Image (spheres, rainbow, N blue to C red):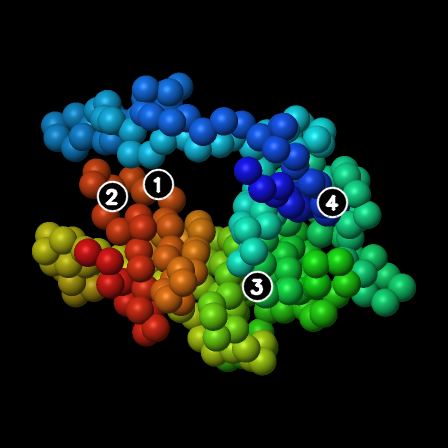
Amino acid sequence: MKKALVKLMTAGMLTCILVSPASAASPAGDSAGIPYTSYNYYYGDVTKPAEINAFYDVETVLTAARAGVEPFQEINDICTDSGGTLYILDGDYRLRGEFSGVKDGDEILSFSGARGIYVFGESLYIADTEHARVLVCDTSGTLMRTILLPDSPLIPEGFLYRPIKVAVDASGYVYVLSDGSYYGAILYSPEQEFLSFYGANSVKNTITQALAKLWKKLTATNDRLANSASRLPYQFTDLYVDTDSFIYTATGKTPDSVQAGQIRRLSPGGKNVLE
């Protein structure tokens, strides 16, 4: 087995660790070695989990002890670059190496509270949630640029910019998810210019709901309409770019009895093309 170079990044620090073959875990080999059961949800009169065979075998397990670092506190995000280097965003916020912040000249920018990380080429994108920005730096921690909330009439008034996930496609287009936003991902050009919102979830109405909405519009007073609650689409909780630059999005648990479209594959126009 080849030695693996693992880069571990915590919220405020980054360190490089060389994992030797002696510390590597052995592959599971077959499904009999999987130390857990798997399940899916059965929808009927009562929604309940149903036990099923595991889809995947465990090949190896990476622990903090195996990597030679202090125990992980809260893994917020994880990604790999094209060379197989693994980046882990851990909500520990304690120094684990020389990457204690992003270097901007003589200033060190903290990214405590960051919730997303993405590697594109030699650039590291950090969704610095609590500081309302995306930091773009090289792998040594030197700031290259900062992506802020766009100044555009397309951005709703009072929009709260809290980046939680960021991804970049093969052409250099940047997709940013902002916590609490149901408009979809914020799309930037390779030149960091704001283009549009991308791929928002839609609200599905039954025929009964559509008729009730129409009746409310015809009969309700202005005061009653002003005080009524609107059904808003659910926000994305994660996104991923595949090798063909298709964007996959994940939506968190919803109160719908049957959750459809939790995982979506979006076309360049932002439409779901995953059956």
The kind of residue tagged 1 is: Lys
Q: How far apart are marks 4 and 1 (CA)?
A: 34 Å
Which residue corresponds to mark 2? Answer: 259
In this picture, residue 40 sits left or right of residue 119:
left
Q: Which of 140 and 22 is in front in this view?
A: 22
Q: Which of marks 4 and 3 is nearer the N terminus?
A: 4
Residue 244 rendering spot, x and y as whole percentages: 37, 66
Which residue corresponds to mark 1? Answer: 253
In this picture, residue 144 sits left or right of residue 188:
right
Q: How far apart are marks 3 and 1 (CA)?
A: 29 Å
Please report the residue visible at 15 percent of the width from the left and 58 percent of the height from the top: 210
Q: Do the residues labelled 4 and 2 touch (CB within 8 Å)?
A: no
User: Between tags 4 and 2, which lies in front?
Assistant: 4
The kind of residue tagged 2 is: Gln
Which residue corresponds to mark 3? Answer: 120
Q: Which of 264 and 29 is in front in this view?
A: 29
Q: How far apart are marks 4 and 2 (CA)?
A: 40 Å
Residue 267 rendering spot, x and y as whole percentages: 31, 69
The kind of residue tagged 3 is: Phe
Tag 4, which secondary structure? strand
Q: Which mark is residue 89?
A: none
Which residue corresponds to mark 4? Answer: 15
Q: Distance between the residues labelled 4 and 3?
A: 18 Å
